[in-house]
Image (cartoon, rainbow, N blue to C red):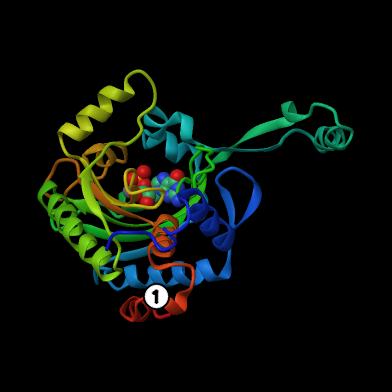
């Protein structure tokens, strides 16, 4: 498999066609209404991923918001403060709220009437699971597996079709001994490639790093790469030269175990790892490679997705 479907037109046109058929603009970069056609494929991919769910997995679907103190405790604000969407609402007495609301309609400055709420927009679908795991008590060596998902927000406005501020993630998360978590992650790197093959998508797997913020960020990113803590499965969407990370395979070592005081029954902090599926990116990749007309997709792919 090589070319994109639609590669007889210019690359800009090909991307514009994808955008036009799959989405409607919503007045902000990286925030899109998704069409029914797109959602059918996303639902098919969701069910396909569920067929890989380990039997013992606990399933949670999280809302698009989570507790601000939980995200503070997780350390996210140290690594990615620039990406977080903090929730704020009109604050004060009923009279003050009314005054601020009136200012909005009178064209007056009004945002000082906002107060920071106790919520943030969930930045990754595994963050809400660690406090749930912590409440379970000591983790067995063989670990716990969670199947989680939610709409995620990251403040990265962009017009690129593969970068959204609001996008859906699905993850399998493993919490247990270092050996269990490393095996989980290594197995998933293999399984994910077989998934991409079954979906008839071209892919590559590479070591990666998270976009850590600020001057110290490059240092953290280099350390993450050197220790091979993050891998990504990349699929060409924008171009073959700059393939897009559609799945990631992460080993957090004891970071969340220590942040949330999750211990192993045998002693020591639990280790954690996750495999993340970018549901929106995977869906766009399917249309980029198989075309916008479902009836022309390879039959085995349609069957796999229940389409
Ligand atoms: P990670 O936590 O590794 O950054 O993200 C996990 C997965 O979520 C990525 O592999 C990717 O598929 C998806 N993802 C991350 N950022 C974006 C984004 O800006 N837009 C979209 N559509 N998906 C994203
Ligand atoms: Zn995760």
Label 1: which secondary element: loop
Viewer-side residue, 54 vs 261? 54
Is residue 138 visible in the rendered image? The answer is no
Q: Quadrant of the C terminus?
A: bottom left
Horizontal side of 165 relative to 279 (left or right) equals right
Is residue 55 visible in the rendered image? The answer is yes
Location of residue 85 in the rendering, given as x and y in whole percent from the top left corner: 54, 38
Viewer-side residue, 7 vs 257? 7
Horizontal side of 35 relative to 240 (left or right) equals right
Q: Residue furthest top?
A: 215
Image quadrant assignment for residue 201? bottom left
Quick check: 259 above or below 37? above
Viewer-side residue, 258 vs 188? 188
- Is label 1's Cβ within 8 Å of ligand 1? no
Q: Quadrant of the N terminus?
A: bottom left
Horizontal side of 27 relative to 35 (left or right) equals right
Q: Which residue is drawn at 34% across and 75% down?
A: 301
Location of residue 87 in the rendering, given as x and y in whole percent from the top left corner: 59, 39
Q: Which residue is tagged 1?
A: 297
| Number of callouts | 1
Location of residue 297 in the rendering, given as x and y in whole percent from the top left corner: 39, 75
Image quadrant assignment for residue 113? top right
Horizontal side of 298 relative to 102 (left or right) equals left
Location of residue 168 in the rendering, given as x and y in whole percent from the top left corner: 46, 55
Quick check: 242 above or below 290? above
Q: Residues within 10 Å of mark 1 (few under 14, many from 20)?
A: some
Q: Residue furthest front?
A: 8
Q: Which residue is drawn at 39% across and 64% down?
A: 286
């Amino acid at each position: 498999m090589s070319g994109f479907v639609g590669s007889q037109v210019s690359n800009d046109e090909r991307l514009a066609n994808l955008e036009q058929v799959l989405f409607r603009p919503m007045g902000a970069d990286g925030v899109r209404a998704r069409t029914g056609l797109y959602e059918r494929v996303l639902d098919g991919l969701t069910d396909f991923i569920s067929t890989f769910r380990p039997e013992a997995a606990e399933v949670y679907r999280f809302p698009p918001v989570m507790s601000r103190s939980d995200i503070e405790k997780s350390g996210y604000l140290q690594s990615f403060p620039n990406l977080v969407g903090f929730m704020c609402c009109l604050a004060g007495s009923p009279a003050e709220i009314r005054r601020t609301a009136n200012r909005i309609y009178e064209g007056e400055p009004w945002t000082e009437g906002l107060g920071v709420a106790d919520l943030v927009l969930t930045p990754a679908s595994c963050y809400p699971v660690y406090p749930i795991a912590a409440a379970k008590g000591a983790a067995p060596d063989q670990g716990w597996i969670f199947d989680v998902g939610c709409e995620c927000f990251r403040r990265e406005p962009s017009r690129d079709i593969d970068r959204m501020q609001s996008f859906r993630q699905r993850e399998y998360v493993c919490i247990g001994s270092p050996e269990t978590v490393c095996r989980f992650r290594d197995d998933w790197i293999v399984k994910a490639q077989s998934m991409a093959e079954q979906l008839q998508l071209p892919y590559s797997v590479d070591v990666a790093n998270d976009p850590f913020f600020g001057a110290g960020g490059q240092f953290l990113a280099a350390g993450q790469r050197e220790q091979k803590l993050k891998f990504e499965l990349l699929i060409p969407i924008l171009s073959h030269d700059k393939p897009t990370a559609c799945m990631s395979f992460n080993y957090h070592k004891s970071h969340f175990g220590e942040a949330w005081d999750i211990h192993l029954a045998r002693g020591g902090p639990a280790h954690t790892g996750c495999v993340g599926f970018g549901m929106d990116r995977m869906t766009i990749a399917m249309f980029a490679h198989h075309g916008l007309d479902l009836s022309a997709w390879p039959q085995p792919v349609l069957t796999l997705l229940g389409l």
